[in-house]
Image (cartoon, rainbow, N blue to C red):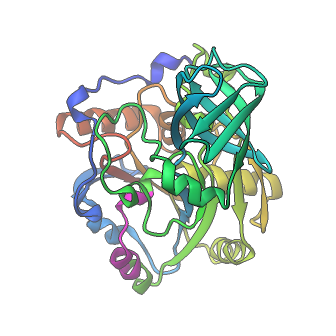
Amino acid sequence: MNIEEFDYVLPESLIAQTPLKQRDQSRLLYLNRDTGETEDLHFKDITRFFRPGDTLVLNDTRVMPARLFGVKEETNAKVEMLMLTQIEGDDWEVLLKPAKRIKVGQTLSFGEGKIKATCIKELNQGGRVMRLSYDGILQERLDELGEMPLPPYIKERLDEKERYQTVYAKAAGSAAAPTAGLHFTDELLEDIRKQGVHIAFVTLHVGLGTFRPVSVDNIDDHEMHSEYYQMSQETADILNQTKAAGHRIISVGTTSTRTLETIRTQFDSFKATSGWTDIFIYPGYEFKAIDGLITNFHLPKSTLVMLVSAFSSRQFVLSAYRHAVNEKYRFFSFGDAMIII
């Protein structure tokens, strides 16, 4: 398939720059895969679509304040570093701006040396592997010095860091938020539990793939970047019981979906496991894990639009996107959502 088949026209004015004051007041577009029915709602109405025995799966990753601004030690030239993935110990895959001036052996300093990063390997497209040194605990230094790594299409500064975290975020390690989960409140999750719906958690740390566009014309030639995932025994048991009882698994976001599909494909069931996934889901893929999907509106020609199109159909999804544009929905990370069942 050609990348142009996943394009759509989006006015820049519809790209949400700030989150709403109330998480569950965002809009919700309902898509029925069987009938083609659609309906304009608000996110708090999502309880309408759950049945007793369903399992709702959330990604509990927590975004690190991993954008650092510092200097190159040799020249004092300004540099920006975005920490993406912990490789091993204090070695991290990062994106640098400007990258071309940073070579193996050179050191960057952040917060007057509170964090130092030495380049140990050069990667493509601005990527580097950096070895960090710091006093104390890295997370504390990042909380002190770092900023939230908001996507480049968000131009406004985020005053409240927690608004780029889900209310259930726990496992620190992401370079971006699993944004479909930003709409949930503690109260809404409790209402869902009271309906007899199980709530289960997986972890997928969002990494480099979120920041890199598809650069090939034929999507069969695209290679996904690997991201770390983890599933607990508790979650595996809930999911296996849900499937065995003939109930539905509803995934919140593309990150949860990729985790569930990776594990179910590998083991033909769910199990406690962890590892790295580069699964690429696009039309023609046969879903093995999920029966419903809650997701935001994604960038044109992105792998995320492809995943959503695979779960329904490309024509139906792009028609829904055109409807959302006409109705002035808010798009991308701080934007509105859809539920597809």
* Residue 322 locus on image (x, y percent): 27, 32
Seen in the image, is 265 located left or right of residue 198? right
* Residue 151 locus on image (x, y percent): 43, 37
Q: Residue at x 30, y 52 (%)?
A: 159
Q: Is residue 177 something that shows in the picture?
A: no
User: Split into 4 quadrants, where in the image is the N terminus?
Assistant: top right
Q: Residue at x 39, y 37 (%)?
A: 316
Q: Please say whether residue 131 is one of the residues in the magenta stretch.
A: no
Seen in the image, is 106 located left or right of residue 28? right
Q: Is residue 149 something that shows in the picture?
A: yes
* Residue 339 locus on image (x, y percent): 39, 55
**Callout count:** 0
Residue 103: which quarter of the image? top right
User: Split into 4 quadrants, where in the image is the C terminus?
Assistant: bottom left
Majority secondary structure of the magenta segment?
A: helix
* Residue 203 locus on image (x, y percent): 63, 60
Q: Give the range drawn in magenta.
A: 181-191
Return the residue nearer the eye: 119 or 170: 119
Compared to residue 331, the image places residue 89 above or below, namely: below
Compared to residue 113, the image places residue 95 above or below, namely: above
Q: Please say whether residue 182 is one of the residues in the magenta stretch.
A: yes
Q: Residue at x 45, y 47 (%)?
A: 148
Q: Which residue is drawn at 54% across and 37% down?
A: 210
